[in-house]
C-alpha cells in the first residue's frame, strides 16, 4: 500500500471496533457457526475453525465466548443457517469494492448493500466486475513492539512454513501467503508464541486508487460506514488508497 502502514489501518479499525465490539463478535460468531457446520466442532480436525478461533483471539474475543459459540453451533440443530454471499461494485471515481456477507435473508442483505452503495454515489455491479483487480491471499500482520524475535528469523520461519512474501514496515511485519498455505504459516507462528495483530484470508488489491476530491472521500466513507453498520456484512475490501 503506497506509503501507508497496514498495521496503522488495523489499529484504526480495532479502535473503531472497540466502540462496537458487539459487531466484530457477531461477525466472528457467525463465522464460527459456519465453520462448525461445515467441518465439525473439533478445531484439531477443522482447519477453518482453527483459523476463525485465531481471528477471534486477535480481536480479543474471550475464550469462554469462543467456546460457547462452538458448543451452540454444534448442539443446536435449529440454529440459523447462514448463506455466504458476495457483492461487487464501484464507489466514487471507479474505486472497486467487494462485500462479503453471511445472511439468513438474501433479499434483506442485497437491499441493504445496494442502499449503502447508492447513498455513497456508487453502484453494485455484476459478479466478477471488480474481483479480477484483487488477489485472494492470506495476510498476517505482526506489531514490531509485540515481536520478540529478529526480523530475519521471523522471515525465515514464515518462508519455511510456506509464506510467499515477507515485508518489513516502520511499525510492523507483513506476511503474505497463498490461501491454501495460510493455516500452516499461521500455526507455525502460533507455535513460536508470536503475537499476531491480524491473521486472515483477505482480498489484496493489485493497484490502489487515490481520491483527491473531498466530495469523493466523503462518499466512499459513507458507503464503508453503512456497510460497517450492517450485521450481515462480514468483510469489505476496497482499493481506495486511504
Image (cartoon, helix red, strand yellow):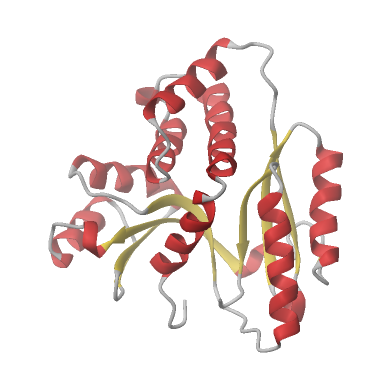
Whether residue 103 is situated above or below residue 129 in the rendered picture: above
Q: Where does residue 148 sit, x and y in percent of width and height?
A: 14, 57
Q: Where does residue 118 sit, x and y in percent of width and height?
A: 85, 64
Look at the image and tell me whether residue 242 can be seen: yes
Look at the image and tell me whether residue 40 can be seen: no
Q: Where does residue 213 sit, x and y in percent of width and height?
A: 71, 88
Residue at (13% x, 58% y) in the render: 149
Residue 4, by quadrant, is bottom left
Q: Nearer the viewer, residue 187 or 19?
A: 19
Whether residue 167 is situated above or below residue 108 in the rendered picture: below
Residue at (69% x, 75% y) in the render: 95
What is the number of callouts on the image? 0
Lateral position of residue 148 relative to residue 56, left or right: left
Lateral position of residue 127 relative to residue 99, left or right: right
Q: Nearer the viewer, residue 228 or 41?
A: 228
Whether residue 107 is situated above or below residue 92 in the rendered picture: above
Residue at (85% x, 57% y) in the render: 115
Q: Where does residue 48 sit, x and y in percent of width and height?
A: 46, 34
Whether residue 45 is situated above or below residue 76 in the rendered picture: below
Q: Residue furthest front?
A: 19
Q: Where is the C terminus found, in terms of image quarters?
A: bottom right
Q: Residue furthest bottom?
A: 212
Q: Nearer the viewer, residue 191 or 144?
A: 144
Lateral position of residue 61 relative to residue 204, left or right: left
Amino acid at each position: 500500500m503506497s506509503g501507508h502502514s497496514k498495521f496503522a489501518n488495523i489499529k484504526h479499525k480495532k479502535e473503531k471496533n472497540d466502540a462496537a465490539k458487539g459487531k466484530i463478535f457477531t461477525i466472528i460468531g457467525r463465522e464460527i457457526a459456519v465453520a462448525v457446520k461445515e467441518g465439525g466442532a473439533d478445531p484439531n480436525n477443522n482447519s477453518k475453525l482453527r483459523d476463525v478461533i485465531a481471528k477471534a483471539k486477535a480481536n480479543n474475543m474471550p475464550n469462554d465466548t469462543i467456546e460457547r459459540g462452538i458448543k451452540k453451533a454444534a448442539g443446536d440443530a435449529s440454529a440459523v443457517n447462514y448463506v455466504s454471499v458476495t457483492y461487487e461494485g464501484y464507489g466514487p471515481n471507479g474505486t472497486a469494492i467487494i462485500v462479503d456477507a453471511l445472511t439468513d435473508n438474501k433479499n434483506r442483505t442485497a437491499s441493504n448493500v445496494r442502499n449503502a452503495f447508492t447513498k455513497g454515489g456508487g453502484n453494485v455491479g455484476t459478479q466478477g466486475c471488480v474481483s479480477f483487480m484483487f488477489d485472494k491471499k492470506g495476510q498476517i500482520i505482526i506489531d514490531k513492539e509485540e515481536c520478540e524475535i529478529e526480523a530475519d528469523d521471523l522471515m525465515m520461519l514464515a518462508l519455511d512454513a510456506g509464506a510467499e512474501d515477507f515485508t518489513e514496515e516502520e511499525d510492523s511485519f507483513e506476511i503474505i501467503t497463498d490461501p491454501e498455505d495460510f493455516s500452516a504459516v499461521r500455526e507455525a507462528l502460533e507455535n513460536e508464541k508470536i503475537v499476531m495483530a491480524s491473521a486472515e484470508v483477505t482480498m489484496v488489491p493489485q493497484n490502489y486508487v487515490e481520491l483527491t476530491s473531498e466530495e469523493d472521500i466523503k462518499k466512499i466513507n459513507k458507503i464503508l460506514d453503512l456497510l460497517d453498520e450492517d450485521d450481515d456484512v462480514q468483510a469489505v475490501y476496497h482499493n481506495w488508497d486511504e
